[in-house]
Image: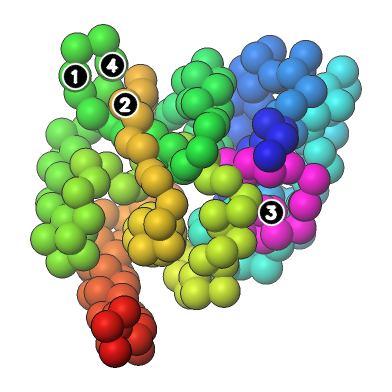
Amino acid sequence: MNRRVLLVIPCFHESGRIKPFLRELKEVFASDDEVSVLVVDDGSGEEEVSKMQLIVEAERQGWSGLRPLLSAPHEGKGGAIYTGWVANEGEDWLAFVDADGSSSAHEVKRLLAMRGEGAVFASRIKMLGRSIERHWHRHLLGRVFATLVGELLKVPVYDSQCGLKLVPRAAFEKVRAGLKLRGFTFDVELLCALLDSGCRVTEVPIDWCEVPGGKVKLLRDSFRMARDVLEIRRSRHDKALDTPRADS
C-alpha cells in the first residue's frame, strides 16, 4: 500500500468561506507530493460553481497537488465526498475535511501522518493538550447525538461527526456497495460499515475551532440524523439475520 492520499473538501455554497482555508492548506501541502486535494461542489448551482472554479484555479498556481474543481449532483455532504473518492483511483488513502477550516491545515497534516493499517477519525474531545472552541448548545446536541449512536448502534465512539477523517481505500471499497446515506449522517454509517467489516478505526483528538456559517440546522437536521441512526440500526440488524452462523 502506497502512502499517497486524496483529501476531498465537500462544498455546498462555500465560496464565501473556503478561500482562507485553501490558502492555509496550500502553505502546508504545496510541497507534499503524497497529498492531493480535491474540492467537490455538491450541486450548488451555476453561479456558485463559477465562483468556486475561480477560487480553486487561483490557488492551483504553484500548487500541483490541488486538482480542478469537481462538480457533482446535489446529494449531500456524504454524496460529494463519495463522488470525489470514487472519481479518483491513484491514491491508496482517502480523506475528507470540512471546507470552513474548523480543523486547521496543521491538524489535517497531523492526522494524515497517522495513516497506517486502519481508519483514523478526528474527534472533538476537550482534554489536556487539545483546544476545542464550540458553542455550548452545539456541544450539548453533539453529546446527545453521540449517546444516541452509542446506545442504539453499540458503537463506543465519542464524536462521530467531526469533519476530518482518513480511510484506507481498500477498506472503503470493501463496504462501498452497502453505503446508502449521503447526508450529514453518512459518516455514522461509514463508521459502522468499517467496524463490521473488521477494519480498525482509531479516534484521535484534535484542536478544533467553530467557524460561523455552518449548513447544519440544529432542530431540522437533528431529527433527520436521529431517523438515519434508526435506519442504520435496522439495516445492521437485517444484515446480521442474513449472515449464516459459523456453526450452521
**Mark 3 belongs to which amino acid?**
Gly
- The crowd level at tag 2 (other Cα within 10 Å; few <14, some 14-19, many 20+) is many
CA separation in Å, label 3 and label 4: 30 Å
Q: Is residue 87 magenta?
A: yes
Mark sitting on residue 205? 2
Residue at figure coordinates x 53%, y 45% from the top left:
167
Horizontally, residue 149 falls left or right of residue 4, namely left
Which residue is identified by label 4?
131
Sequence-wise, the earlier of marks 1 and 3 is 3
**Mark 1 belongs to which amino acid?**
Met
Sequence-wise, the earlier of marks 2 and 4 is 4
Residue at figure coordinates x 15%, y 66% from the top left:
152
Q: Position of residue 132 (x, y in %)?
A: 27, 22
* Above-or-below relation of 208 to 74: above
**Mark 4 belongs to which amino acid?**
Ser
- The crowd level at tag 4 (other Cα within 10 Å; few <14, some 14-19, many 20+) is some
Q: Which residues are magenta?
A: 82-96
Q: Mark 2 against mark 4, which lies toward the viewer?
A: 2
Q: Mark 3 against mark 2, which lies toward the viewer?
A: 2
Q: Position of residue 121 (x, y in %)?
A: 40, 39
Asked which secondary structure carries label 2, the reply is strand
Q: Are marks 1 and 3 in contact (CB under 8 Å)?
A: no
Which residue is identified by label 3?
84
Q: Nearer the viewer, residue 9 or 146?
A: 146
| In the image, farthest residue toward the front | 247
CA separation in Å, label 1 and label 3: 33 Å
**Mark 2 belongs to which amino acid?**
Pro
Which residue is identified by label 1?
127
Asked which secondary structure carries label 1, the reply is loop
